[in-house]
Image (cartoon, coloured by chain):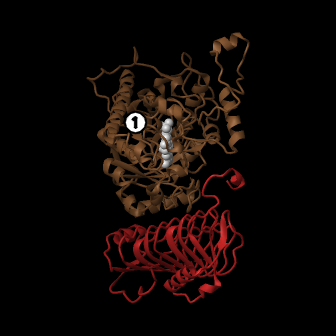
Chain colours: A brown, B red
Amino acid sequence: MTLTAPDQTVAPALPAPALAELGLRESATFDRATIADIQRAAETGIYDIRGWGAKRKVPHFDDLLFLGASMSRYPLEGYREKCGTDIVLGDRYASKPLRLDIPITIAGMSFGALSANAKEALGRGASAVGTSTTTGDGGMTPEERGQSKHLVYQYLPSRYGMNPDDLRKADAIEVVLGQGAKPGGGGMLLGQKITERVAGMRTLPIGIDQRSACRHPDWTGPDDLEIKIAELREITDWEKPIYVKIGASRPYYDTALAVKSGADVVVLDGMQGGTAATQQVFIENVGIPTLAAIPQAVQALQELGMHRKVQLIVSGGIRTGADVAKAMALGADAVAIGTAALIALGDNSPRYAAEYAKLGSAAGYYDDFQDGRDPAGISTQDPELSARLDPVAGGRRIANYLRVLTMEAQTIARACGKAHLHNLEPEDLVALTIESAAMARVPLAGTSWIPGATGAGL
Amino acid sequence: MTTTLDNVEAQRTSVQTFDLKLGGVRELNKTLHHATDGDTFAVDHPGGKHSIAVGVNAEVDIEINGHVGYYAAGMNQGGRITINGNAGVGVAENMMSGAVHVTGDASQSAGATAHGGLLVIDGNASARCGISMKGIDIVVGGNIGHMSAFMAQAGRLVVCGDAGEALGDSIYEARLYVKGTAASLGADCIAKEMREEHLAELGELLRAAGRDDDPADFTRYGSARTLYNFHVDNSSAY
Ligand SMILES: Cc1cc2nc3c(=O)[nH]c(=O)nc-3n(C[C@H](O)[C@H](O)[C@H](O)COP(=O)(O)O)c2cc1C
């Protein structure tokens, strides 16, 4: 959202405590951001489109804590005793499953939404630590294929740039049904970013405001998806793992149906998951939090006897190694990161404070990915801005960040006495709030109470 | 250059035949993926099976004798594939090049998202024919169903019968030629003038499909381009 102050408002000169002492009270319902939204809508007549994920506060991994080892559990020695991090994705049907060194992957973000340099940096960083990157709604670029040792190729409703040569070049295929930021919505890329190269890759006129389809053009429902997945397997001779990505809304049913449709891997993206451009009303009001989604998906997998056989990748708000460990303890096999990877590259860095101010934003608030004027050179197609991001240095930052996430997760796993991140389990967790206890299905700290545990469980 | 259906019969040399009553689709596709230019195949008893002859990547001739299920000839690159029968959902979906000929009718989403090549359907095609097409040429001898050429980006769709409701909804730069009537036009799709170059390209497409309809009897439809950029006054169309 752009922080353009409407003409009639004058920024208060007094700091908030002084205002309170004067008896002035900000409305919780009509707070200043809401007031600015209403005034912006009244001025422009069009809804707000922005990047980033849901900004509202929802129960999240912060509301969970680990129970470290003590009398009844053995911790592992830091550094000296091994804590494994490797994973295999897609060994249900694929003859060439993905073997990654760490369970943290880079989520699908399109060339178009991101600059070629940003894509290259993600590829370099991921390859350096033995993990995968993912294409996006705009096809596969040679830069990306060249830099990514493990590349997941997205199969989206728009099918921009989709072709069998790239399908055969991919290491895995991800059929995208939805995204956590907008379950039920299609892609969007505004004209500023539809340059000649982006337009060419998508077979679109240059400079149009692109709205991509939200439904796949040649299948509807799980019975069709099963046939579609079989077709993709036939085309690629049953070599590649096939993922199905869902935005978290009804993850219990969607996961079960994805498994039934023949997926090797389910990718589950919660509502905090980032986007390149979506209506704000959509981002903030559709979908459920990542924390609430994971146990539902895991339950579906367990009931089908498929937990750990069909792998679960979770995304949406992963920031730290603690988040990685918590997602895995709840039953995920791996996680994916989008927003955090962009931040690691330099997105929202205070270094660009002056330039964010010129764009009517600020470091820490910048979410106008749709505008293509990113001073950090990440969410842009402008050659001058893109050139600010050195893909080699960016790759190093990504690799550093992924290493830190991994070591943090290992620190926690060892403290819980686990010789592999996979061995983390819900029993290692407690919740700080009643809401998070109910959603994550772990007891409220200091009690044995899991709200709703005796109920239907969905 | 328009791909044509000529010579498919003439070129056949030694034919390798698959009977899908005996062997599976996997074995067929595996063989096709290892074929080289000029190889010729026949497929008997397809029995409505799905994914027949998908991912073909050579200039081979394939004749399928009977009805096929979903996604027959999907993602074809260079193959010249004849289906002597009806085709299920998504025939020739995402084709890149080559030619696919259906002698009967085709189900929904025929030629969906295809980037190139020629798809000829002698009979009717159901809903969403040419949906999200990205450069393919499609010629349908009969009628097409509703929502055809939805978000069609590039390529040409020729319909020798009538078109169903909401033809060309949210269309981009694809060109549609309809001989009969369109039940209704989708958002931003309008009838356009048939200029010389359109008559010429339509004539070429009809000839490529082995048809003798008169291009002058067709109406051209395409994008009014009013939805290309967000505009406050278009909010009811969003
Ligand atoms: C700039 C940007 C572009 C994205 N593009 C796509 C896309 O093309 N396809 C897709 O499935 N998801 C896309 N996503 C969503 C990510 O794949 C992922 O689900 C999400 O970013 C994960 O949540 P996180 O951002 O909190 O890590 C995009 C996200 C961002 C931030």
Q: Under tag 1, what secondary structure?
A: helix
Q: How many marks?
A: 1
B130, B76: nearer the viewer: B130
Q: Is residue A7 visible?
A: yes
Image x and y of residue A154, in percent? 45, 52
Q: Where does label 1 land, which residue?
A: A345
Q: Is B45 displayed left or right of A21 in the figure?
A: left
A45, A428: nearer the viewer: A45
Residue depicted at 37% across the width and 40% down the height: A389
A109, A267: nearer the viewer: A109
> Would you place residue B175 above or below residue A333 in this image?
below
Q: Is A20 displayed left or right of B28 in the figure?
A: right
Image x and y of residue A311, in percent? 44, 43
Q: For the N terminus of chain B, give its image quadrant.
A: bottom left
Image x and y of residue A164, in percent? 40, 63
Q: Is A214 displayed left or right of A124 in the figure?
A: right
The local crowd at label 1, few if under 14, some if 14 to 19, many if 20 or more residues have their Cα within 10 Å, is: many
> Would you place residue A20 above or below residue B77 in this image?
above
Residue depicted at 70% across the width and 30% down the height: A35
> Would you place residue B131 above or below residue A104 in this image?
below
Residue depicted at 33% across the width and 28% down the height: A419
A263, A276: nearer the viewer: A276
Please name the amino acid that badge 1 sits on.
Answer: Leu
Q: Which quadrant would residue A271 be assigned to in this image? A: top right
Q: Is residue B49 visible?
A: no
Q: Residue furthest top?
A: A21
Q: Does the Cβ of the disc 1 residue fall within 8 Å of ligand 1?
A: no
Image x and y of residue A240, in percent? 38, 55
Mark 1 belongs to chain: A
